[in-house]
Image (spheres, rainbow, N blue to C red):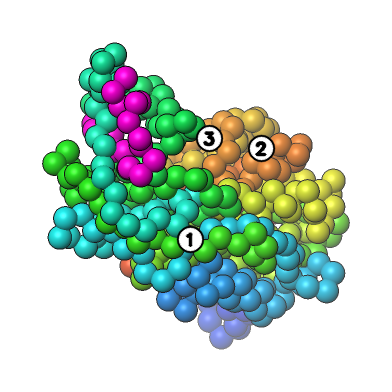
């Protein structure tokens, strides 16, 4: 439960009443404690959900590279820190930096036969794709084309530069053959114009470089071996000096040594009119950090607490890479880093990633969780480089990562929206982290 201490204060106030018997006081105090905690808990979850809804709303354009949605989200977070009383380190909450990024102008279009595919749902361009406009024949690559000498010879003798290749499932099911073929056709001298990835659900991303060929992800329903050509209009807007920023602030404890709580706020932005709301990924992690900030502002911990909201995670963990190379608060004063990325699902399990690398830390977390029963399925796991924490670990700073699984299967799709989130373990993670930090001296 959040803000338990306020309930205890309330309980203590109730105890001073002289007009009632001691038993009655205790009884009514206990009831009030329960009611008070439950109502504060509901209020805090209401605040968490409000933050997730706001950051996922069209006002932030998917917190990416359309209309500077990332910077709008950074301003929002800085305002929240200010409101809470978390101070900037130095004179600003922002650590600005420049990077290259690819985005797409206007409304991209893909037509297969007479059918206009829906952006973000039926198809996306992988963001390393350059500008591609026109009609292109499709060459289907099947196993026999790769394993029959004659067929392969014929294929390689033809001019592929104006074609897209598409892999049928007999090749996709053989990973090694698939990657061999993919590399063969996307490198000189056989470089094709593009590749079609036939997938269950097209997932978008963000990238800081361009390939010379396109990669188009199409829902398998629309791309079958009878399809002979595609019509595409995709205009890349690549920039080499896009300015973005990490956001960071500090709550002073009784010592300068700090625990650093991190989570990325960026997402992919938009692909044409498709908005990537990124409610679970990672408005939920931002809401967790802001809620922890609100708690620790009222309950000063022994260690100082730094909060870092990273930019450019989706573009290859670049915000955290930049930060670790240019720390705002001395890394040698950082005792532990805890990352929160996608924490509003968790009907299957919650992973405490990197816990296996730090047995003592793992023991403390697992003991608290077992004693208090906060999270039903908490799984400690090993090394992982799929979010921002690993740059800290690689720099020699212990770093953990909370990640939840089960409940929202729309990772990197426009369907990662707030109304799908159930927050089954959000409060459990919150309370576990609070207890762990409060037990440290
Ligand atoms: Zn994420």
332 in relation to 308, above or below: above
11 in relation to 264, above or below: below
Depth order, front residue of 362/441? 362
Depth order, front residue of 236/304? 236
- Mark 2 near ligand 1 (CB under 8 Å)? no
Residue 128: percent from left, percent from top: 49, 50
* First in sequence: mark 2 vs mark 1: 1
Q: Which residue lies at the image location 81% right of the left edge and 67% below the top edge?
A: 89
Depth order, front residue of 161/421? 161
> Which numbered disc covers residue 380?
3
The residue indicated by pointer 1 is 236
Residue 277 falls in image quadrant: bottom left
Is residue 158 shown in magenta?
A: yes
* First in sequence: mark 2 vs mark 3: 2
In this orientation, does residue 107 appear? yes
Q: Is residue 167 left or right of residue 330?
A: left
């Amino acid at each position: 439960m959040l803000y338990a201490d306020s309930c205890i204060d309330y309980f203590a106030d109730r105890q001073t009443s002289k007009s009632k018997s001691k038993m009655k006081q205790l009884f009514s105090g206990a009831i009030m404690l329960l009611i008070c905690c439950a109502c504060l808990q509901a209020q805090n979850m209401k605040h968490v959900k409000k933050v997730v809804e706001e950051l996922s709303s069209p006002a932030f354009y998917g917190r990416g590279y359309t209309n500077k949605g990332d910077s709008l989200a950074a301003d929002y977070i800085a305002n929240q820190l200010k409101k809470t009383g978390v101070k900037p380190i130095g004179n600003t909450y922002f650590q600005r930096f420049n990077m290259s990024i690819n985005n797409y102008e206007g409304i991209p279009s893909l037509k297969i036969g007479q059918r206009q595919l829906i952006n973000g749902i039926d198809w996306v361009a992988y963001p390393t794709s350059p500008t591609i406009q026109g009609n292109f024949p499709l060459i289907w690559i099947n196993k026999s084309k790769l394993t029959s000498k004659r067929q392969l010879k014929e294929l390689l003798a033809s001019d592929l530069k104006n074609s897209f290749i598409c892999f049928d499932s007999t090749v996709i099911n053989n990973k090694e053959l698939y990657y061999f073929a993919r590399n063969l056709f996307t490198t000189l001298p056989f470089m094709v114009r593009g590749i079609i990835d036939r997938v269950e659900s097209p997932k978008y991303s963000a990238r800081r470089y361009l390939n010379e060929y396109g990669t188009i992800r199409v829902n398998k329903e629309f791309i079958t071996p009878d399809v002979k050509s595609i019509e595409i209009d995709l205009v890349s807007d690549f920039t080499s000096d896009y300015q973005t920023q990490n956001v960071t602030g500090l709550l002073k404890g009784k010592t300068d040594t700090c625990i650093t709580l991190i989570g990325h706020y960026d997402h992919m932005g938009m692909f044409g009119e498709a908005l990537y709301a990124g409610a679970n990924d990672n408005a939920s992690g931002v809401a967790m950090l802001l809620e922890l900030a609100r708690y620790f502002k009222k309950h000063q911990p022994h260690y100082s607490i730094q909060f870092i909201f990273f930019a450019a995670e989706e573009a290859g963990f670049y915000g955290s890479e930049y930060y670790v190379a240019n720390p705002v608060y001395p890394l040698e004063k950082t005792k532990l880093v805890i990352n929160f990325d996608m924490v509003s699902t968790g009907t299957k399990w919650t992973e405490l990633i990197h816990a296996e690398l730090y047995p003592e830390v793992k023991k403390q977390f697992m003991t608290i969780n077992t004693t208090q029963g906060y999270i039903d399925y908490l799984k400690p796991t090993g090394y992982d480089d799929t979010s921002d924490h690993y740059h800290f670990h690689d720099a020699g700073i212990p770093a953990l990562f909370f990640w939840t699984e089960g409940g929202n299967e729309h990772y990197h799709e426009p369907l990662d929206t707030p109304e799908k989130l159930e927050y089954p373990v959000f409060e459990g993670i919150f309370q576990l982290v609070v207890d762990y930090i409060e037990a440290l001296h």
